Image: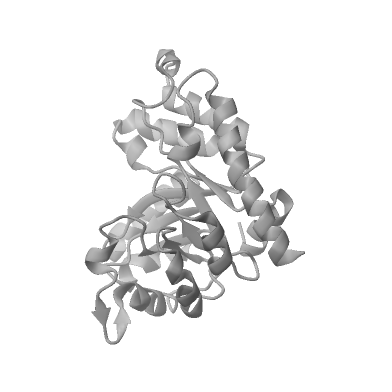
Amino acid sequence: MTKEELFKQILAKESFLCVGLDTDLEKIPSFFLDYDDPIFEFNKRIIDCTKDLCVAYKPNTAFYECYGAKGWESLQKTLDYIPDDIFTIADAKRGDIGNTSSRYAKAFFEQLGADSVTVAPYMGSDSVQPFLGFDGKWVILLALTSNQGSKDFQFLEHKDQKVYQHVLETSKQWGSDDQLMYVVGATHPENFVEIRKHVPDHFLLVPGIGAQGGDLSKVSEFGMNNQCGLLVNSSRGILYASREKDFEEASRSAALKLQQKMAVSLTKKFH
């Protein structure tokens, strides 16, 4: 999916919502445990009730890998079930020496068929470049994350720049804004203005809305560019809005609430 195609979907749906499919067997409604593949059956229902409200789905691969081959099967079935016009993110946070990264890229792009994969930049350019060699696929590079531990390294000073700023400035030379996005946590809304000075045209994947306390209105105000440039993720707030049989209605309601707020921000920006 190209950046223009993604922006077209955002305008059509009046949404830049990404639904995180971090499906936890201990949190989904218990009746799903009677199915042969409870993870996929739950995901299928979540997709059915939110697909008109979001432009992306982001399964975190850890929630599938922990079940071995059966979990990978659930992940494959989930990605196959997502409509073709919705952007898919394999949230795997990979990154290793070149020949290893090339195998990771093949796994997520050629085997699973994801549109993008999250990648850690710590090992540098040769650990990221193999992911950038696939036409029509995207790398989403970790820059400023939403977890508390982000302060351990990402805000350290390096040559009059914080480390995350150096990551942005250095890595944007590795690929174009048609193939490279960045993870920027919603828990740091005050940094979006400055981040946009470094990467004005790139899309940003923004976790941390909802359970982690991120402010959607501030993210929209400070982070949006002339093609929206935002994919704001919500996982737990949508997936586990209810653990009863009304979970579909509750999940849709949670997604709709976010979509409606996004529609207001998009209208202000583009109309």
Residue 218: image x %, image y %? 53, 62
* 64 relative to 156 in the view: left or right: right
Q: Residue lying farthest right?
A: 271
The total of numbered circles placed on residues is 0
Q: Nearer the viewer, residue 223 or 62?
A: 223
Q: In the picture, which quadrant includes the N terminus?
A: bottom right
Q: Residue lying farthest bottom?
A: 159
Residue 167 vertical placement versus 144 (above, below):
below
Residue 264: image x %, image y %? 68, 55
Q: How is the image coloured?
A: one colour
* 223 relative to 152 in the view: left or right: right
Q: Is residue 136 visible?
A: no
Residue 213: image x %, image y %? 41, 50
The residue positioned 60% from the left and 42% from the top of the image is 257
* 128 relative to 87 in the view: left or right: left
Q: Is residue 201 visible?
A: yes
Q: Nearer the viewer, residue 239 or 139?
A: 239
The residue positioned 33% from the left and 41% from the top of the image is 62
Q: Nearer the viewer, residue 97 or 221?
A: 221
The residue positioned 29% from the left and 58% from the top of the image is 100
Residue 84 vertical placement versus 139 (above, below):
above
Residue 27 vertical placement versus 197 (above, below):
above
The residue positioned 41% from the left and 44% from the top of the image is 211
Q: In the picture, which quadrant includes the C terminus?
A: bottom right
Q: Residue lying farthest left?
A: 152
